[in-house]
Image (cartoon, rainbow, N blue to C red):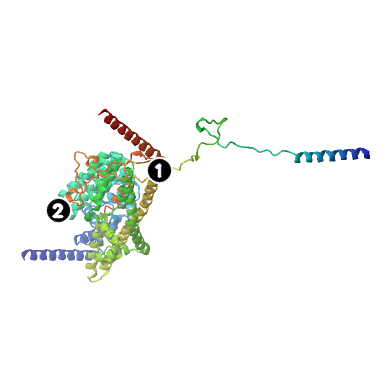
Amino acid sequence: MKKIIIKLLLIFIICFEAFGSLEKARQLYNDPKVERKNEKITYELIMGDYYFSAIPFAIKHIASTQKINPEFEKALKALVVKAGPEIFFDVSTEVLVKHDSPTLYFVLGLRYFHEKNYALAIKYLEKVPDNNYLQPEVRLTKGAAYSLLGNSDAGYTEYKKCYNYAESAVSSSANDKIKRYYAILKETCSIHVARLKFTSQEYDKSIEAYDEIDKTSYKWPYVLLEKAWVKFKQKDYNRTLGLLVTYKYPLLESYFMPESELLTALSYHKLCLWEDALSVVDQYYKIYKPRSEALASVLIKNKTSDNYFFYLTHESTQMLEAKHPFIKSLITQIKKTVKYNVEYGAYKIAMKEATLLKKMNRDDFIRVLIEETDTQINSKIKSLNWYIKEYMYEFINKINGLSFQLFKIRIDIMSKKRDLIYKGTQLISDRGRGDLKHVNRTVDEQFWEFTGEFWADELGDYSFGLKSNCEEVKQRTFEDVKQEILEEEKSQKKKDDDSSKGVKND
Amino acid sequence: MTKTIVTIFLFTLFTTSFHAFAENKKEKVIVEYKKYERFDLGNLEIQGSVIAPGDVSVKERERKVLETDFYEKKDYFPDIRRDVLNLK
């Protein structure tokens, strides 16, 4: 009971303070004599948790003043954390550059990264001091910029720093959501290192970096496919197939990746297990054709809408299931992404602000704030709508692109089968099956036998034990059969002769 | 002149009629083939150069090599870029 009373009191105090701050901001707005009006209103609104309402006042202050003070830098930090750095993307470069502000340098760096001007992105990101709260994001962005410029060594250095900064941010954060955010950032840096090692064909080091990702991580299911590609490049097709079979685990149902089907078919193809490869190809067409059609129908009907896809994520599971079970699973996949969660979190903050403002007496000041929050809400809806639509378009394009790749595998198998007939040969066996001796293991790699059941601790450590079926043997011809019969007759005759000699001797 | 022409005509007529008579008088030739003949196939020889192929053959034509450049992951640059764009 006491706890409830304390909580209610706290809520009341917070609400009172928020209302108080809004009232102060209103007074400042209506007072024509106040100096540094926009700066002061920004502080008051942020104090009252009206982040989206504070944006236009903060921008006006950045544009009008020659130098921003440390207190305003803190206000900028709050705005970037709650509303995202893109709120300042429309501010001109001249305005952003004139202040020695780490937050605004980060905004500039990120904006140049969006524009693919990686050299300028690095230039501005380097101005952010080492003790700044944005260091994990800055180092990740710099690492990516260096990688995309082809400077892998500088990329590794940045990713290493990103990992360390993110790790210390995890341990210093009190909030669980923030902890999770920095943990994902830390893992992203490890994954980027693994990807660069993969590109430079240092496959063992790539696997080492991927192994940094814990099985409980949000990123882990995505890493399985990337690890499978490394194993494929190392020609360990059994481990590749073992990693990919993890996606059949019922709880990973929403992590369906068409590329994993292609990699499975390629691995069987490399092992010359053609019937298995062809069955994967057939299965792919059977599963993904109706999915592609269902997705295409949703996309074509609503491609011009600015909010359809955003509201699709709000529909109930039953409603989504009725559209198509695949649409439901794809929406689940999208809702698990960092981008969706961060943007949706910002949208909810803006909505909360708008709801509170709309309950108040509407004078000029409140009208300005309502207008601003509505603009920000619409912008967030459009941004998320675009993100979901793009995700779906990319998915459907991938399904179609991979379908062509699988068709090429089918044609190649048909061609190879014909070659065998022409040469009068055949593969050593039609279906080579598994054996432990075909399983490759490193010292720190686990091995579990798959007996039709998935166990959480075994996930990601499976390996097939298939023998390569690529050896060719000569096919028996009519002449071979004739020769065999003659030899058999000869040996029979010899036996008969020997036995008759034996009888005579007796 | 007229006498000469008549002489030539009569000579020609006489010659052709004689030939026709002689042909009618030719004897009928009856050819008798051996009723049994043994061929030693192993001993048979063909003289001259053999130009016909020994058995059925098809001239080999150039095989069409199918495109086998299957998709393989080479780098993750688009994914690296997307990770930063979707950061916040």
Q: Amino acid at mark 1?
A: Ile
Direction bottom: furthest residue: A361
Quadrant containing the C terminus of chain A in the rendered view? top left
- Label 1 – label 2 distance at C-alpha: 69 Å
On screen, residue B39 above or below A72: above
Front residue (pair A183, A371)? A183
Q: Is residue A12 left or right of residue A277?
A: left
Residue A232's image quarter? top left
Q: Earlier in the sequence, mark 1 or mark 2?
A: 2
Front residue (pair B83, A282)? A282
Give a yes or no on whether discs 1 and 2 share a subunit: yes
On screen, residue B50 above or below A402: above
**Tag in front: 1 or 2:** 1
Q: Chain of mark 2?
A: A
- Cβ–Cβ below 8 Å for labels 1 and 2? no
Direction top: furthest residue: A505
Image coordinates of residue A279 in percent, x first then y, are 32, 51
Image coordinates of residue A247 in percent, x first then y, are 25, 52
Helix, strand or loop under label 2: loop
Which residue corresponds to mark 2? A174
Q: Chain of mark 1?
A: A
Q: Is residue A69 visible?
A: yes
Q: Amino acid at mark 2?
A: Ala
Helix, strand or loop under label 1: helix
Q: Residue at x 27, y 31 (%)?
A: A503
Which residue corresponds to mark 1? A421
Front residue (pair A430, B56)? B56
Residue A330's image quarter? bottom left
Which disc is residue A340 wearing?
A: none
Quadrant containing the N terminus of chain A in the rendered view? bottom left
Q: Is residue A307 visible?
A: no
Image coordinates of residue A454 in percent, x first then y, are 19, 52
